[in-house]
């Protein structure tokens, strides 16, 4: 994180975080980049970036008139040149105020989930900086299909020699049916097993070695899968966990289903106790409660 008092570095961090996270409220940005100073400094920083044409905002009509910030086309062009955003792809309609307003619910919930992991890491002495949360990383399944998680999380534990954990995070606001949510489990299983065949090269004959799984180009181990459930009551949470449990039960007992932790937790519990608390339900046995790093 930028050193306190380094205004230029904090301006750059604010723009990078806003570009990568898609959208934040003023308070979310403040807690992500500069929680040890007064929030007025973050307000002035965002106003300065807006005056320079790098970011823009909309005001939500709810009580309190929350300001929601996003990068402009110019801000996206500037941020895309920075090495810390080397693999970042700016979203379409990035500077469209109407599009921004229509996607605030989901995007701000994803940002709030990120904030919980960042703050929890700070309390624990672990490393999870704001840019360690990368939304919408494209993972091809071939034939035009892809898995695009809401976020890819990088998290380094202080214990155990600084082991690096990675997780795909799916934030569900109950806008789709339980069956469609549960189908994502199968999509990640397909990603785990997907082996691309180079164009122009015939598929290997029986007994020949197959190409390596595509995910191994990016990750030393397949990231664990976390479902964060929101925007529904306890009965809705239970319905969605039952659907996820049923989908996990249909996986083969080898490969993805055996080696990759798949966990679900209500966002309300994460907000109350922090994501490292034993509140995650393994989909193979949702009666258990474990930490996500389990």
Image (cartoon, grey):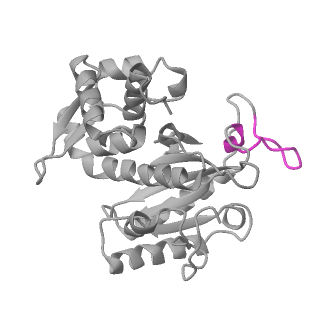
In this view, the residue farthest toward the bottom is 287
Q: Residue at x 38, y 74 (%)?
A: 237
Front residue of 284/189: it is: 284
**Prevailing secondary structure of the magenta residues:** loop
- Locate residue 256 relative to residue 238 in the image: left or right: right
Does 207 lie within the magenta span?
yes
Q: Residue at x 25, y 36 (%)?
A: 40
Percent coordinates x, y for residue 158 in the rendering: 67, 51
Is residue 219 in view from this perspective? yes
Front residue of 223/50: it is: 50
- Locate residue 119 relative to residue 214 in the image: left or right: left
Percent coordinates x, y for residue 173 in the rendering: 33, 61
Does 178 lie within the magenta span?
no
State the count of labels: 0
Is residue 143 in view from this perspective? no
- Classify the position of the C terminus by image quarter: bottom right
Q: Residue at x 37, y 27 (%)?
A: 15
Decide: is 150 above or below 83.
below
- Locate residue 223 relative to residue 62 in the image: left or right: right
Decide: is 41 above or below 63.
above
Percent coordinates x, y for residue 254 in the rendering: 74, 66
Decide: is 131 above or below 286.
above
Q: Which residues are magenta?
A: 202-217
The answer to which quarter of the image holds residue 24 is top left
In this view, the residue farthest toward the right is 207
Percent coordinates x, y for residue 83 in the rendering: 55, 21
Front residue of 286/208: it is: 286
The answer to which quarter of the image holds residue 225 is bottom right
């Amino acid at each position: 994180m930028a050193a306190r008092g380094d205004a230029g570095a904090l301006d750059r961090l604010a723009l990078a975080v806003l570009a990568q996270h898609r959208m934040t409220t003023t308070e979310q940005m403040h807690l992500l980049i500069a929680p040890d100073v007064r929030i007025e400094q973050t307000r002035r920083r965002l106003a300065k970036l807006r005056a320079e044409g790098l970011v823009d905002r909309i005001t939500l009509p709810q009580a309190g008139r929350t300001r929601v910030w996003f990068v402009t086309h110019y801000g996206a062009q500037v941020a895309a040149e920075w090495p810390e955003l080397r693999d970042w792809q700016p979203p379409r309609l990035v500077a469209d105020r109407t599009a921004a307003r229509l996607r605030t619910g989901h995007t701000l919930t994803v940002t709030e989930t990120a904030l919980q992991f960042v703050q929890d890491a700070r309390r624990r002495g672990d490393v999870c900086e704001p840019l360690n949360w990368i939304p919408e990383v494209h993972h091809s399944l071939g034939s035009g299909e892809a898995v695009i998680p809401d976020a890819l999380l990088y998290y380094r534990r202080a214990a155990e020699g600084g082991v690096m954990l990675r997780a795909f995070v799916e934030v569900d606001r109950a806008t789709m049916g339980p069956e469609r949510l549960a189908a994502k489990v199968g999509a990640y299983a397909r990603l785990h097993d997907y082996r691309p065949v180079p164009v122009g090269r015939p598929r290997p004959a029986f007994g020949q070695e197959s190409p390596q799984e595509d995910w191994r180009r990016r990750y030393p181990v397949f990231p664990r899968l976390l479902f964060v459930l929101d925007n529904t009551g306890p009965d809705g949470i239970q319905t969605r966990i039952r659907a996820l449990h049923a989908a996990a039960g249909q996986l083969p007992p080898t490969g993805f289903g055996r080696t990759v932790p798949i966990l679900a937790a209500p966002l309300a519990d994460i907000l109350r106790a922090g994501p490292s608390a034993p509140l995650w339900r393994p989909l193979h046995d949702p009666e258990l409660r474990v930490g996500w790093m389990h």
